[in-house]
Amino acid sequence: MGAPALAERRPTDAVRAHWFALPLLRALDGLGGPAGGVLDVRLDEGEFHVRTGVRTAGSAVYGDGPAARADARIVLDAEVCLALGSGESTFAEAVRDGLIEVSGEGPLAAELRGE
């Protein structure tokens, strides 16, 4: 896994936002129910999107840049994203502590906010 390398960055390292997708997906596992949804993610490093819920073989689980149509959007920093991926924090804890901003009106956004 490349997640540990993301935590050990030097100022001269190039980092792409979507490299954080797989660690974040581990923290989102089970959210959104079987149908899931599309979640736009914004980090200082850039934007990407992920698909929550049950995935079918051959379907994309993440993509670079914002989705054409997202069910919810989150804003967080890379350190929080890594803490989620490593299990140091849960998504609900990070939202409660104000470390993740969730926007959107649908069921996925409400679930991410803990409503």
Image: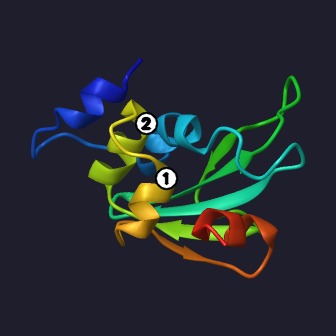
Dot 1 falls on a residue whose secondary structure is helix
From the image, which quarter does the N terminus lie in? top left
Q: Is residue 87 left or right of residue 49?
A: left
Q: Which residue lies most toward the top here? A: 1
Q: Residue furthest left?
A: 11
Q: Residue at x 37, y 23 (%)?
A: 2
Which of the 4 quarters of the picture holds residue 13? top left
Residue drawn 36% across the image and 72% down it: 98
- Residue 74 at x, y percent in the picture: 53, 67
Image position, residue 114 (x, y; %): 61, 67
Q: Could you tell me the amino acid type at mark 2?
A: Gly
Which numbered circle lies on residue 85? 2
Q: Is residue 84 left or right of residue 28?
A: left
Residue drawn at (36%, 28%), measured in percent from left and top? 3
> Residue 67 location, x and y as percent?
70, 62
| In the image, residue 54 above or below residue 67 | above
Instruction: Kindly identify the amino acid type of the residue bearing the numbered disc 1.
Output: Phe
Mark 1 or mark 2, whichever is nearer to me: 1
Q: Is residue 32 above or below residue 23?
A: below
Is disc 1 surrounded by few (<14), some (14 to 19) or many (20+) residues within 10 Å? many
Q: Earlier in the sequence, mark 1 or mark 2?
A: 2
Question: Disc 2 on helix, strand or loop?
Answer: helix
Q: CA distance from mark 1 to mark 2?
A: 10 Å
Quarter in which the C terminus is drawn: bottom right
Q: Nearer the viewer, residue 11 or 35?
A: 35
Label ID, residue 91: 1
Name the quadrant containing residue 83.
top left
Asked whether, in this view, residue 4 is left or right of residue 29, the answer is left
- Front residue of this view, candidates 46 and 54: 54
Above or below, comparing residue 50 to residue 72 in the picture? above
Residue 76 is marked as none
